[in-house]
Image (spheres, grey):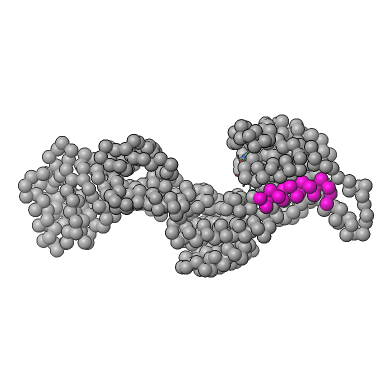
Amino acid sequence: MKVLVSDNLGEVGIQMFREAEGIEVDVKTGLAPEELKAIIGQYDALAIRSATKVTEELIAAAPKLKVVGRAGIGLDNVDIPAATKRGIVVMNTPTGNVITTAEHAIAMMLALSRNIPAATASLKAQRWEKKSLQGRELYQKTLGVVGYGKIGAIVADRARGLRMRVVIYDPFVPPEKITADGYEAVSLEDLYKQADYITVHVPKLKTTANLINKEAFAQMKPGVMIINCARGGIINEADLYDAIVAGKVGGAALDVFEIEPPGDNPLLTLDQVICTPHLGASTAEAQTNVAVMVARQIIDYLTSGTIVNAVNVPSVTGELLEKIGPYIKLAEQLGLLQAQLIQGAPKEVVVEYFGDFRGIDLSPITTALLKGLLTPMVKEVVNFVNAHVLANQRGIKVTEATMAAHEEYTYLINTKLVTTEGESVVAGTIFGKQDTRIVRINTFRLEMIPLGHMALIHNQDVPGSIGEIGTTIGKHNINIARMQVGQETGGDRNIIFLCTDTPIPQEVIEELRGLRTVKTVTPLEF
Ligand SMILES: NC(=O)c1ccc[n+]([C@@H]2O[C@H](COP(=O)([O-])OP(=O)(O)OC[C@H]3O[C@@H](n4cnc5c(N)ncnc54)[C@H](O)[C@@H]3O)[C@@H](O)[C@H]2O)c1
Ligand SMILES: O=C(O)[C@H](O)COP(=O)(O)O
């Protein structure tokens, strides 16, 4: 497996890749998009920070790519829908740099209030200016925090330590939580009205781009100070420039820009603006944290399939994988069986989980079922990342339900597939710790091991019929490794599962179909 590190990653992470068995790592930073596109085809994994742009075009040039790991938080440089469609896991390290970034926001607020950058420049230019560099206290001022996630919450906590009054706007966090943490939950309008300082800590999304704009500045207190250590463009840069020049905004501290590096961005010409080159996460501690996390996550995914901190597929830790692994395998086999029995185009899948699955995230199991179902049907590679997307694209409705214990089985997965031609039901369970068994196919009860080359035969339950089938197969020198017979509930038909050492050739299938008691023969592969 080959990993490309295309942005500056802490050495400790690179060392982890070097030491991982079966993994080769190349470090090539600062590549132009065309240079990256030219080499990405050889890599199974890509480790990035914010500089590399993982576009749809780059993904199209990366047929082997399985995982993109972001050493840090923001993923606005990754086309996640394009990656998902291709089955590429996108993961980040959501906790590794949050303290560092929150501290940077506080540092920026203090530096802005006390004119530290200007004072440093002035003194180094041999001037001793005190009057013009007079600042303001934070004590008892109101800080408005927009976005009460991981970083916003740490900023609020540190600001409280500076004895600021903290008001918070986050429509996705219950106000009771904010109040219980000791802050005031306010509307965005009230935050604008009350805050002496406003700091943003939201992700950059369609809904948050230009969140703070001309209309917002108009509602703010004169002299308000703005801090952005989240993402460029959450605050409209042109509107911020105008508000500073008009004297409405007293100053701004910017770590991030809509275009990075910001080149000749007019904001950089203003004395009231202090800035850093996207240094929010740049401490030795944070870079060690995120490098170790991303390297561990990529190695684990490539070597054991464990998914941690993925944003486009449910995370499955090694521990959970051990617990639900047999059910993942069973669900995939049930899906594969449905796909081979299917008549018509699938419209709906209903998955019922019988037994005590309490506290277990079932979504990876349902995803496995879709993977099994879709793999024989679509030309794309189906995996745990894109199975739902592909089902959705084909208009297949997926419903999942948990049920009380089944009357016969402690745990049972029952699947119903509705197609344009009708519906079929197959169910399975686990014997012992991890042996998968199919126990129901429509009206037939059985105990089938879904493994290898198989044929499913519906026949009339009369003496001699099984013997005729065995003789026909034996005559062609095909060895039957296993045979299981299932009976119809309340009927006179059997189903027979034959598992053979080699696939049964088409002409033998036809010969079996011609036997007097045989109704249907369906070859199956697991
Ligand atoms: N400058 C840096 O180097 C640096 C480092 C790390 C993270 N970041 C950025 O910091 C930001 C916050 O990161 P985080 O880890 O705290 O994210 P998070 O996901 O933990 O928190 C984001 C919060 O924003 C809230 N939110 C979403 N839309 C909102 C809206 N319209 N109005 C108000 N709140 C809204 C969410 O409910 C959530 O609570 C992200 O943009 C991230 O990219 C920057
Ligand atoms: O989202 C993040 O984690 C930060 O913006 C850090 O970006 P960087 O890794 O490019 O410093």
Residue at x 79% of width, y 47% of height: 110
Residue at x 9% of width, y 57% of height: 471
**x, y percent for residue 287:** 64, 59
In the image, residue 237 sits, relative to residue 41, either above or below, namely above
**x, y percent for residue 209:** 65, 42
Do we see residue 197 in this rendering? no
Question: In terms of image quadrants, where is residue 156?
Answer: top right
**Residue 107 part of the magenta-drawn span:** yes
Q: How many marks?
A: 0
**x, y percent for residue 334:** 31, 47
Q: Is residue 509 left or right of residue 11?
A: left
In the image, residue 421 sits, relative to residue 67, either above or below, namely above
Do we see residue 428 in this rendering? yes
**Residue 104 part of the magenta-drawn span:** yes
Q: Is residue 299 left or right of residue 108?
A: left
Q: Is residue 448 left or right of residue 72?
A: left
Question: In terms of image quadrants, where is residue 227?
Answer: top right
Q: Secondary structure of the magenta portion, mostly?
A: helix
Q: Which residues are magenta?
A: 99-116
Outermost residue toward the left in this view: 463
Quarter that holds the C terminus: bottom left
**x, y percent for residue 179:** 65, 33
In the image, residue 140 sits, relative to residue 268, either above or below, namely above
Residue at x 56% of width, y 53% of height: 92
Ligand 1, what quadrant? top right
